[in-house]
Image (spheres, helix red, strand yellow):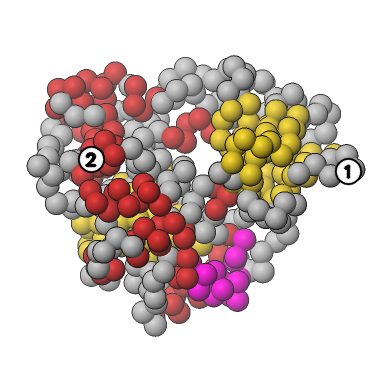
């Protein structure tokens, strides 16, 4: 039988759920509804639809669940393209509408800079933080925080902001334990929450690895087998026993059951040390990829609807890359000969275009759907 999921007390006294559902990676309304039925109450989403988030579907699932709004902790993230005072106000109001609520439990600054913006935002993360402080002071937002902030930025915001973050959400897994920043957060009474805790970030690294290195590592598998639990449960439990939040993007019901059962066992001190020793190790087998991965391709969506972009793997498989809203653009690092396919989001029967990365141009722009004129190559 599942035990109640633990909470952590933020510095303002609120009880924050330590375990919840991450809503990126294609998590849709049905997955959120299933998680609610299982008993999960923390949902982490974001305004960045092009990274697979669907704020409005999270809002629909919660609103239609029959469960009191007060039982949930709804967290979203401010997209960097909305930096600046007025854009941040508008973005928060839009999130409230999408999530069908009159308050947010927490909102985080998603990234400190906008690496994909076609034009600079109206302001900086510091301008936006001041607006989030105002929303916090008037009760519209119950807690505010940051994501993907390193030590320098954390020291800056703690030293200079009127209200320091209640929490920080960063990448942490057994091979990347972010120990120094976690210690800084603990020393400053700031909650630390891990994303990609099951190793999902390694496939994006320049010298990335094949497969799922966290889920297949023999030391973690041995601990899981000995406890008669899944590897994912062991990793989540490892986080929780350190007071670290976990938000796995669990779409399958059996994985959501695993999340709900992470408190039915505990790891020994030796188990914790075994996983702790994995920090800093480069996991798995390096990916086979071209040595030069230095072309920046920009895909511009001129269609009146959201499109889904895929890249084609060396073995011919379609691999989901990202969604791009109507009128939006998105960039990706790639290499000559790499092929991308564009479809209407939710309809993979009708391909809008096939795009092959050319040789010799460091920046290349592709229009979706392809226009009569040739796609632009930019020096």
- The magenta region covers 81-95
- The residue at 12%/40% (across/down) is 264
Say left or right for 298 vs 12.
Answer: right
Crowd around label 2: few <14 · some 14–19 · many ≥20 (10 Å): some
Q: Is residue 359 magenta?
A: no
Asked if residue 58 lies left or right of residue 226, the reply is right
- Report how many numbered discs are placed on residues in the image: 2
Real-space Cα separation, disc 1 to disc 2, in angstroms: 51 Å
Q: Is residue 217 visible?
A: yes
For mark 2, what is the residue? 257
Rendering coords of residue 272 (x, y %): 21, 33
Return the residue found at the far right.
Answer: 373
Of the image marks 1 and 2, the number of the one nearer the N terminus: 2
Name the quarter where the C terminus is drawn: top right
Regarding mark 2 in the picture, which secondary structure is present there? helix
Q: Are marks 1 and 2 in contact (CB under 8 Å)?
A: no
Q: Position of residue 210 (x, y in %)?
A: 48, 21
- Residue found at the very far bottom of the displayed protein: 138
Up the image or down, 343 lies above or below 98; here it is above
> Which is nearer the eye, 223 or 337?
337
Question: Crowdedness of circle 1 by 10 Å Cα count: few (<14), some, many (20+)?
Answer: few
- Name the residue located 40 percent from the left edge and 62 percent from the top edge: 59
Q: Closer to the observer: label 1 or label 2?
A: 1
Is 96 above or below relative to 219?
below
Question: Which one is in front, 308 or 376?
Answer: 308
Q: Main secondary structure of the magenta part?
A: helix
Residue in the picture at 33% in, 37% down: 252
User: Which residue has dot 1 on it?
Assistant: 372
Q: Could you say which is closer to the camera, residue 177 or residue 338?
A: 338
| Residue 333 falls in image quadrant | top right
């Amino acid at each position: 039988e599942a035990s109640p999921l633990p909470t952590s007390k933020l510095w303002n006294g609120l009880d924050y759920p330590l375990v919840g559902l991450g809503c990126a990676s294609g998590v849709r309304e049905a997955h959120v509804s299933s998680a609610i039925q299982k008993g999960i109450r923390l949902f982490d989403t974001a305004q960045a639809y092009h990274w697979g988030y669907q704020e409005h579907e999270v809002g629909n699932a919660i609103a239609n669940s029959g469960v009191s709004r007060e039982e949930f902790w709804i967290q979203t993230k401010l997209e960097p393209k909305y930096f600046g005072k007025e854009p941040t106000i508008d973005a928060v109001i839009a999130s409230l509408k999408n999530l069908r609520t009159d308050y947010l439990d927490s909102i985080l600054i998603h990234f400190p800079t906008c690496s994909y913006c076609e034009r600079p935002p109206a302001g900086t993360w510091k301008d936006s933080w001041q607006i989030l402080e105002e929303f916090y002071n008037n009760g519209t937002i119950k807690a505010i925080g940051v994501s993907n902030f390193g030590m320098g930025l954390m020291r800056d915001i703690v030293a200079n902001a009127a209200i320091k973050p209640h929490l920080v959400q960063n990448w942490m897994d057994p091979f990347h334990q972010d120990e120094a920043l976690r210690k800084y957060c603990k020393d400053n009474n700031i909650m630390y929450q891990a994303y990609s805790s099951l190793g999902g970030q390694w496939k994006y690294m320049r010298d990335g690895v094949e497969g799922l290195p966290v889920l297949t590592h023999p030391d973690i598998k041995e601990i899981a087998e000995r406890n008669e639990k899944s590897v994912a449960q062991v990793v989540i439990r490892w986080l929780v026993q350190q007071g670290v939040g976990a938000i796995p993007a669990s779409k399958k019901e059996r994985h959501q059951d695993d999340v709900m059962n992470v408190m039915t066992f505990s790891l020994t001190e030796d188990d914790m040390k075994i996983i702790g020793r994995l920090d800093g190790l480069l996991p798995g087998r390096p990916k086979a990829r071209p040595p030069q991965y230095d072309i920046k391709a920009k895909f511009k969506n001129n269609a009146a609807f959201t499109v889904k972009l895929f890249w084609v793997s060396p073995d011919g498989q379609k691999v989901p890359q990202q969604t791009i809203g109507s009128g939006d653009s998105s960039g990706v690092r790639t290499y000559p000969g790499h092929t991308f396919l564009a479809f209407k989001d939710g309809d993979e029967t009708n391909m809008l275009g096939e795009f092959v990365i050319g040789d010799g141009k460091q920046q290349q722009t592709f229009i979706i759907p392809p226009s009569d004129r040739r796609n632009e190559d930019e020096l």
